[in-house]
Image: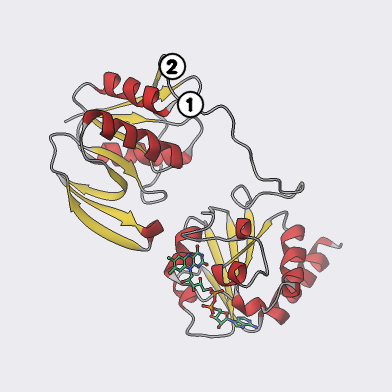
Amino acid sequence: MSALVFLEPNDELSLQAVTLAQSLGGEVRAVTIDGPFAPSAWAGALIEAAGADDIVGPGTERGNEILAHVAAQLDLPMAANVTEVRGDEVTRQRWGGSLLEEARIHAERRLLTAAPFAFAPAEAPAAETLRPDVNGAVQVLEHVAPDTGGKISLADAKVVVSGGRGVGSSEGFAILEELAALLEGAVGCSRVVTSAGWRPHTDQVGQTGTKVSPDLYIACGISGATQHIAGCKGAKTLLAINDDPEATIFNHADYAVIGNLHEIVPAITAELRKVRGT
Ligand SMILES: Cc1cc2nc3c(=O)[nH]c(=O)nc-3n(C[C@H](O)[C@H](O)[C@H](O)COP(=O)(O)OP(=O)(O)OC[C@H]3O[C@@H](n4cnc5c(N)ncnc54)[C@H](O)[C@@H]3O)c2cc1C
């Protein structure tokens, strides 16, 4: 069976979806879609281009939305956020990646999205561009980004300095703010922190918050609950600072500092300033 992959332009997650499509074993064709985002019309165009092939997309909000429309229009099941496929059996992430589910697809073709960061990105393939007629279809006209007050947004930041209960208070985040500013990064936090009202929900990283994939994630006073890890496991490097040597976060960390964050974070900041001569 061949597969058609839906690619978003300049999107690493789409290249991961290509790797998923290649793992299915057949020929892989790729398409991009041009024009205003109209999920049902885009799904129709994908169905037409795919013929009887499997259809694969990235596990992005848009990829999952379009594949869901494809599934509804074809009256077929869809498996979202897949990490592995074995014939008609798939392993997929549920609850923001905090648990894995084995499922069997009871259909003659597979409609799949790739779980973010579950596959290495493939080489960008040559892709045909589809231009569906979106007249009469519901169209998404505008995305309004939250006002970050000129600061780097959490989702785009290359460095995220994130704090948990161990920070202790809203005021305690000042040392994280200082380090983040020095690294041209953003401040994130755990749900305990937003529940306590120390930071707004827009700063929350995790299953019910923002999913981040920075080059460096510095977790300060965060225990490493699965729901938090679901939001930061895309980080290329994770540095954990925690005063409990048994903290779960250390199982996910590339670098571990065992100690009091209120001493260690200012020490890192001071060292950075010294090295930079600022
Ligand atoms: C459905 C559901 C969805 C959820 N979604 C999210 C989500 O999106 N994001 C999220 O984060 N959580 C989420 N949670 C909550 C999650 O289960 C945890 O409760 C939460 O992540 C814990 O936050 P924490 O690590 O800050 O606090 P804790 O688990 O209390 O950990 C605090 C850590 O700080 C350390 N510490 C304390 N003082 C210091 C110090 N001075 N120096 C260094 N270390 C110190 C402690 O050793 C401890 O490891 C969700 C839960 C559920 C049930």
* Pointer 2 or 1: first along the chain: 1
Image quarter (top left, top right, bottom left or bottom right) of the C terminus? bottom right
Instruction: Decide if residue 84 is on the left or right side of residue 259.
Output: left
Q: Is mark 2 within 8 Å of ligand 1?
A: no
Q: CA distance from mark 2 to mark 1?
A: 13 Å
- Is 149 above or below relative to 144? below
Residue type marked 2: Gly
Q: Nearer the viewer, residue 213 or 133?
A: 133
Q: Which element carries disc 1, helix, strand or loop?
A: loop
Q: Nearer the viewer, mark 2 or mark 1?
A: 2
Residue 31 on image: x %, y %: 37, 24
Q: Which mark is residue 136?
A: 2
Question: Which residue in the protein does label 1 denote?
Answer: 37
Question: In which quadrant will I find the N terminus?
Answer: top left
> What percent of the width, then of the height, locates residue 269?
76, 69
In the depicted structure, whether residue 278 falls above or below residue 11: below
Estimate the x, y position of residue 272 in percent, counting from the top left.
76, 66
Residue drawn at (41%, 14%), measured in percent from left and top? 133
For mark 1, does the 10 Å Cα neighbourhood hold few (<14), some (14 to 19), or many (20 or more) residues? some
The image quarter containing residue 165 is bottom right
Q: Amino acid at mark 1?
A: Phe
Instruction: Indicate the position of residue 148 as horizontal and vertical percent values.
Output: 71, 48
Q: Residues within 10 Å of mark 2 (few under 14, many from 20)?
A: few
In this rendering, position of residue 38 left or right of residue 191: left
Q: In the rendered view, would you say 114 is above or below 248?
A: above
